[in-house]
Amino acid sequence: MATCLAGLTGCVVAPLGYYDADGNYAGEAAVVSDAAPPAPYHETVGVAPFVGAVWLAGYWNWHGGRYAWVPGRWGHPRPGYVWHPYRWAPYGHRWALSGGWRRR
């Protein structure tokens, strides 16, 4: 039993609603990790491929018990929404990931 519980300490779900990079409502939950995220990669942002394109910067995601880099990409704007880049912030003694499309 203790072994099973130890495996659950790296990531928990906390109520923080958000939209994902594709503009889909990702629910009333966000990722929370006990481990601080690594420093972000430096990404070179090229010329926008179309008028109004929004840069969706890369970020560290928590997946499979470890951090995995999700590269940035260009996306289409969503009327009535503003893109907030994903970021990790202290959340008590843990780290919470937030970001995505949010209503103006």
Image (spheres, grey):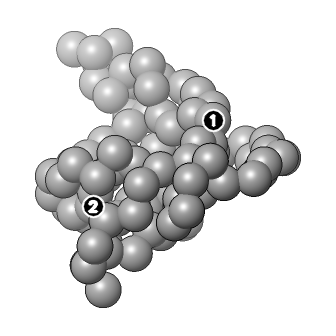
Quadrant for the C terminus, please. bottom left
What residue is shown at x 56% (from left), y 48% (from top)?
A: 74
Within-10-Å neighbours for mark 2: few <14, some 14–19, many 20+: many
Instruction: Indicate the quadrant where residue 37 lies.
Output: top right
Q: Please identify the quarter of the rendering in which residue 4 is found.
A: top left
Quarter of the rendering occupied by the N terminus:
top left
The front one of 103 and 99 is 103
Sequence-first disc among 2 and 1: 2
Q: Nearer the viewer, residue 54 or 36?
A: 54
Residue density around tag 1, few if under 14, some if 14–19, many if 20 or more, within 10 Å: few
Left or right of 96, for residue 44: right
Residue 71's label in the rendered image is 1
Name the residue located 37 percent from the left edge and 21 percent from the top edge: 7
The amino acid type, in three-letter code, at marker 2 is Tyr
Question: Left or right: where does residue 100 sit relative to residue 73?
Answer: left
User: Which amino acid does the dot numbered 1 rest on?
Assistant: Pro
Q: Which residue is mark 2?
A: 18
The residue at 63%/35% (across/down) is 71
Residue 83: give x, y in percent of width and height: 44, 68
At mark 1, the secondary structure is loop
State whether residue 7 is above or below residue 71: above
Percent across and percent down for residue 72 are 62, 43
